[in-house]
Amino acid sequence: MPFFSQFPVLETKRLVLRELKYDDGPDIYAYFSEGIAQYYDWLPATVPEGRGFVRYFKSGYRDKHSIRWAITVKPRDKIAGTVGFSEFEHFSRADLGYELAKRFWGQGLMSEALEVIIPFGFQTMGLHRIQALVVPENTASIHLLEKFGFQKEGLLRQYNYVRHRNVWEDNLIMALLREG
């Protein structure tokens, strides 16, 4: 049984956050190919692997392990990135994850998405803690999280193995707690 009777669609002034579709696979592959994978531990090497990204999050939602939205810029329904929660711990804690196609960087779109995702996590899903793992060199992501009040809690040494680069990487763990 899914979390909600229908997948929750969220809107902002410029964005529609909707359920991922298999038709998004080629665009996901395309934007990962633009070089955003330097801060990601997975890289779709083919269009079918881009669809595999969609399949992974669709099954995670079905099995209540994750919820991931496609980020689309109005008025088009073309995916610009994704954002969502995974690794639920009794619905009290979840990991925040996101990525955005390079051509949309620097426009405040991820900030706009997080402005609705974070309250959704705390208020609608009842989360107590939202945490994110960030590569220490990804200063843009660190600044974005700090803007929303996330605090650095520590360094996880050689925490993730990145297959497409054949390296173990460190991750900062950053977290935000629900107030009151």
Image: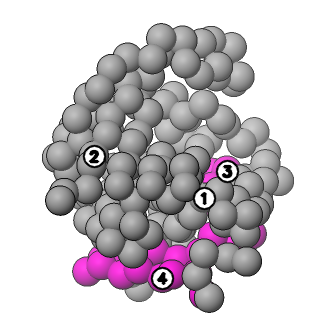
Camera-side mark, 2 or 4: 2
Residue at 65 percent across and 57 percent down: it is 65
Camera-side mark, 1 or 3: 1
Disc 2 crowd rating (10 Å Cα; few below 14, some 14-19, many 20+) is: some
- Residue 37 position by quadrant: top right
Residue at 78 percent across and 48 percent down: it is 49
Q: Give the alpha-carbon distance from disc 1 to disc 3, as whole Å.
A: 20 Å
Q: Name the residue tied to disc 1.
A: 66
| Quadrant of the snapshot with the C terminus | bottom left
> On residue 176, which mark appears?
2
Q: Sequence-wise, which precedes: disc 2 or disc 4?
A: 4
Q: Element under label 3?
A: helix
Q: Which residues are magenta?
A: 6-30
Q: Amino acid at mark 3?
A: Tyr
Camera-side residue of 91 and 11: 91
| Quadrant of the snapshot with the N terminus | bottom right
User: How far across and how far down the image is residue 32, in percent?
Assistant: 59, 44
Q: Amino acid at mark 4?
A: Val
In the rendered image, the vertical position of residue 157 relative to residue 9, given as above or below: above
Camera-side mark, 1 or 4: 1
